Image (spheres, rainbow, N blue to C red):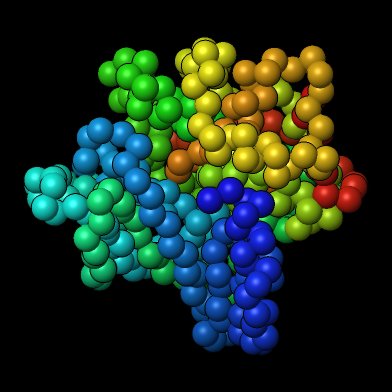
Amino acid sequence: MGPGILNQVLHCLPRIQDDNLLVGMNTVDDAGVYQLSENMAIIQTVDFFTPIVDNPYLFGQIAAANALSDVYAMGGHPVTAMNIVAFPSKKLDITILSDILRGGADKVLEAGAVLVGGHSIEDNEPKYGLAVTGTVNPKKVITNSGAKPGDKLILTKPLGTGIICTAIKAEMATHDIEVEVSRLMATLNKEAAAAMIEIGVHSCTDITGFGLLGHGLEMAQGSHVNLIIYAKDVPVLPYSLEFASMGLIPGGAYRNQSYTEGEVNVNTGIDKSLTSVFYDPQTSGGLLIAVEEAKTEKLMLTLEKRGVTEASVIGEVIEGTGKIEVK
């Protein structure tokens, strides 16, 4: 669902007042955070979607990694997970569902969490994801509203997964391309989160369905700052620009662009295909981190030591009123 429609719906819900609710629906953060004690808060999140690759096991891994990501984005550690399943058991071989669940279970295990159950329904189209509970120290919650002027912006994974998945569905992508993008989407943000926790950062969000510019705008508006994105420094998946130039762009990219209109300025000299990548809805994308300039080099080195080798410094934070400029 696009960010514009989602905002309209959420505005109809009552605002919850609870002193222990540290992060709720009053902001546009990645997950909810509820304090249990002086040193313990829980992070709660949920995510599920339809298959984006043909391999059931890989789909399960990707969906699980995507759901776990919100906990990492807020500086937390996943503790438990529950399966969310919709499946046409009378139309598809039940072994397909077994492979999906096995992929998800393996990714939960890799995260160091425990799979504790779930819920399933009959549906005409398969859907899979997780409800995840994590823990975090209440004093160390990382939100998307803490960016400060002078911070540098770091993106930990390249963009373009939505465009490439569209090409896969159109049978325009090779098997090698599908394997590479699946590997990226199935990669947990666990090590990236550990690096930012170790160094200490001001703000973070994971880049998923609203794309780099949609989630970046949430950070800018929540932090009451402006973001500058340097287009040439943004990591982009090979072939995503080629597919975008062929018109293989998911509908979500257009919804993201419409939602940010008037708040995001993309300089006229930037290629339209690259602009499409910046709006591209990501599945299990990387973390967008705002860190003070003095810590930037150390964070980049720590990310590399932890195996996060595709991270890049893509911009900076300046004083402002919640807008983005892409140069």
Q: Position of residue 80 (x, y in %)?
A: 34, 68
Residue found at x 81% / y 42%? 263
Q: In the image, 112: left or right of 285?
A: left
Q: Measured along the vertical axis of the image, is residue 125 above or below residue 15?
A: above
Residue found at x 28% / y 18%? 175
Total labels: the figure holds: 0
Q: Measured along the vertical axis of the image, is residue 295 above or below residue 138?
A: above
Q: Residue 89 or 278: which is nearer the viewer?
A: 89
Quadrant (top left/top right/bottom left/bottom right) for the C terminus: top right
Residue found at x 38% / y 54%? 48
Q: Residue 297 or 96: which is nearer the viewer?
A: 96
Residue found at x 55% / y 54%? 73
Q: Which of the 4 quarters of the picture holds residue 11?
A: bottom right
Q: Measured along the vertical axis of the image, is residue 47 above or below residue 27?
A: above
Residue 191 can be seen, yes or no? no
Q: Position of residue 287 (x, y in %)?
A: 56, 44
Q: In the image, 168: left or right of 285?
A: left
Residue 84 can be seen, yes or no? yes
Q: Position of residue 153 (x, y in %)?
A: 70, 39
Q: Position of residue 118 (x, y in %)?
A: 26, 68
